[in-house]
Amino acid sequence: MANSKKAKIIINADVKKGKINKNIYGQFSEHLGRCIYEGLWVGKDSPIANTNGIRNDVVHALKDLKVPVLRWPGGCFADEYHWKDGIGDPEGRPKMINTHWGGVVENNHFGTHEFFELCEQLETEPYICGNVGSGSVQEMSEWVEYMTFDGVSPMAELRAKNGHEKPWKLKYFGVGNENWGCGGNMRPEYYSDLYRRYSTYVRNYKGNNLFKIAGGANTSDYNWTEVLMRESERFMDGLSLHYYTMPLSWGDKGSATVFDELLWFKTMERILYMEELVVKHGTIMDKYDPDKRVGLIVDEWGTWFNAEPGTNPGFLYQQNTLRDALVAGVGLNIFNNHCDRVQMANIAQMINVLQAMILTEGDKIVLTPTYHIFKMYNVHQDAQLVSTSLECEDYVNGDKTVPQLNVSASIDDKDILHISLCNLDPNETVEVTSDLRGVIYKKVSGTILAADKMNAYNSFNAPNSVVPAEFKDVTIQDNKLSIFMPPMSVIVLNVE
Ligand code: AHR
């Protein structure tokens, strides 16, 4: 204990700062590698236990996360996807090449109907991303008609012919993906005009109101946000932002499991940068939308490392360590703390791709450290953010520093206060005193995710190396919490 760092957090439980939109805990599943095929979809005839082709083990595990919203079919794949290829008799569906992701054959067995089935099984809200880059206005417009129109029309008839008489409910619709890059290499002025045109024909049919999301910026491309907001703000409900956490560069992103402390530190720096991005893009949005009507939709985020050796590099399959858990914890804290503007975030991706919740190998699955963070943090979904003020020492690496701790807190509808706290320092423990103000609290309990090694991970042979445990090093007296946190750990406290 002698070397422990000290920190203080004041929590004003009576200062509510707005609802944490549960959609911040959203996910993303693309036709990429083994996310859809093998990860989610095995087909009705598979020996792997499934319901209507969707694997039961995966659905069962994901339901514990309370996934609020799921984005599909891409990513870069979305701007090459022609939805009519994915309806009707599966055996008659055309095959295509998935040019972005490994050049493999896409048989289109998982299409619109299967996606809605998945969302129903997960009890999650669908978020569909349409094709601007290589599609047409008509194609996008007809897809929305196919999914949501209740009446007599060519697309409603086609849907009924394919076995779904009634329309589905669809709220979230994205008009293209990364249109500054894989979605067409456009300039913001050009995309902005296209957004206005496409979104005009993305109709709100009776009983179905769409929340239209414009394709937003890459990382710190503030000009993109400026142009989109200036030219098209009134036509959108959300504007996206994509930012991936990688400790090195796009060329060599570093290994997911073999890294030293410098790379751990850089990873922490890079996820903390998310806060600057949210603030700066948010400030531009404030200029055109001071009432914060338009949501910042961080619909791709998470770690991106080199693909696991021996796997198809185009499949973006990576392991997931305690480092990923810290990234998830810090990222979610940042979104919680900026819930006045961040209305949704979708970690990339749900299964077998990038910072996944679950990895699969044949009929086996393993839950990653990131999965456990999403489960621990789901208490914040739709809770009220409360004001926190943190004073902590730095985590120092060479001549660089980051704050040792990262926090957010909320009060749920049962008046339970939840505090999520990350210790980014892989070497130092920390003694935290937390003053709880404005409400009298008597009881505290908690959960911790930690490990002895920075690169600890769950494998198919050792699936329980990084799993949550009851957190006992916390006491409450006179409305003050005394917390003793180990290095590189994430805790979530419940205070009553
Ligand atoms: O998530 C992987 C890819 O990253 C997505 O397809 C694309 O939108 C982004 O560049």
Image: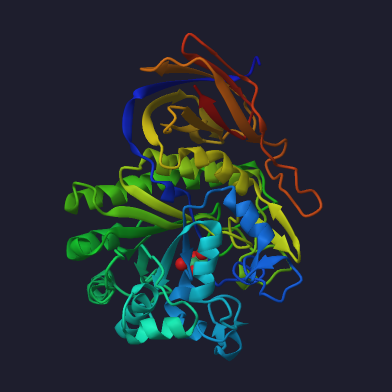
Taking depth in this image into account, of 28 and 330 the one nearest to the observer is 28
**Model colouring:** rainbow
Q: Is residue 275 above or below residue 237?
A: above
Taking depth in this image into account, of 182 and 448 the one nearest to the observer is 448
Q: Quadrant of residue 444?
A: top right
What residue lies at 62% left-to-right and 44% top-to-bottom? 372
What residue lies at 78% left-to-right and 55% top-to-bottom? 460
Outermost residue toward the right in this view: 461
Q: Position of residue 21 (x, y in %)?
A: 38, 46
Does residue 139 appear anywhere in the picture? yes
Left or right: residue 454 versus residue 245 is right
Q: Position of residue 280 (x, y in %)?
A: 30, 48
Q: Is residue 412 above or below residue 10?
A: below
What residue lies at 25% left-to-right and 62% top-to-bottom? 236
Q: Is residue 342 above or below residue 121?
A: above
Q: Position of residue 55 (x, y in %)?
A: 66, 64
Taking depth in this image into account, of 312 and 300 the one nearest to the observer is 300
Q: Quadrant of residue 110?
A: bottom right
Q: Quadrant of residue 179?
A: bottom left
What residue lies at 36% left-to-right and 17% top-to-bottom? 438
Q: Position of residue 183 (x, y in %)?
A: 40, 75
Numbered circles on residues, count = 0
Q: Is residue 1 above or below residue 223?
A: above
Taking depth in this image into account, of 427 and 359 the one nearest to the observer is 359
Does residue 357 appear anywhere in the picture? no
Q: Quadrant of the N terminus?
A: top right
